[in-house]
Image (cartoon, grey):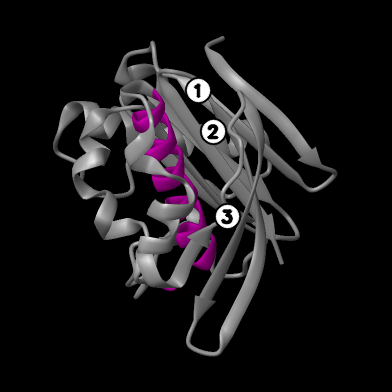
Amino acid sequence: MPIYYQQNINDFTQLAVWKIEESESFFTQLVTVQQQVTHPHKRLQHLAGRFLLPYLYPNFPSDLIQIADTRKPYLPNEAYHFSISHCGDYAAAIVSSTQRVGVDVELVTHRVNKIRHKFLHPSELSNWDIEAMEEQEKFRTLTLLWSAKEAMFKWWGRGDIDFSECMQVEKNTLKSSGILNARFQKDKFTASLELHYRLTNELSLVWVNND
């Protein structure tokens, strides 16, 4: 079973990352495509993400999932809060019966360096000292920070967010796993968030669970 990573975050919240090694038929026996996904690999990613929901919570009512105007998938009665992410051959999902959640998984890549000014505030670029980093460290750090903001964006779930202005991540020494402290602010709403992460030279995973 290609579970890449799994964690019981607390009594009500679970997380898993699946390395996709199966054909589409493996997933379609268990879940259906609820969106119009024409690209074969993107459809495979979609199916793997949906597959993880009942994998984590066997009673998860996948057939009741709806898509909000912000493109966020949700359950109408919020029996479970959940978030899905995928990249390359990986799919990630987090499910909670009590807390709002967000997850993001990304392949570490140089491409994120080209858009760093779009999602990082000037103070973040300065505090993290991005320009002084060795190339590989820079790509790992930027990918993790992008993951962090994507996870927060999904946790927020209401769209209309300026990644640079509304979400800022405090400088920290990066390890293979750890916690990042972040501040989220949208209009009059503010929240201090703990973002949990796992980071390798190939993959970045960030999740948040907070009421």
The numbered mark at residue 18 is 1
Residue 83: image location, x then y, percent = 52, 50
Amino acid type at mark 3: Glu
- Which of the two discs, 2 and 3, labels the residue nearer the N terminus? 2
Vertical relation: 64 (above or below) 202: below
Find the distance from the CA under tag 2 to the CA under tag 3. 31 Å
Q: Residues within 10 Å of mark 3 (few under 14, many from 20)?
A: few
For disc 3, the marked residue is: 170
Find the distance from the CA under tag 1 to the CA under tag 2. 8 Å
Judging depth in this view, the residue of 30 and 18 nearest the camera is 18
The numbered mark at residue 89 is none
Prevailing secondary structure of the magenta residues? helix
Q: Which stretch did the figure color magenta?
A: 137-158
SS category of the residue bearing label 3: loop
SS category of the residue bearing label 2: helix
Judging depth in this view, the residue of 207 and 115 nearest the camera is 115
**Residue at x 36% of width, y 57% of height:** 120
**Residue at x 45% of width, y 38% of height:** 144
Q: How many labels, in total?
A: 3
* Residue that extends furthest to the right in the rendered view of this protein: 11
* Residue that extends furthest to the bottom in the rendered view of this protein: 188
Q: Let me know if residue 34 appears in the view.
A: yes
Callouts 1 and 2 close, C-beta under 8 Å: yes
Relative to 156, is 164 on the left or the right? Answer: left
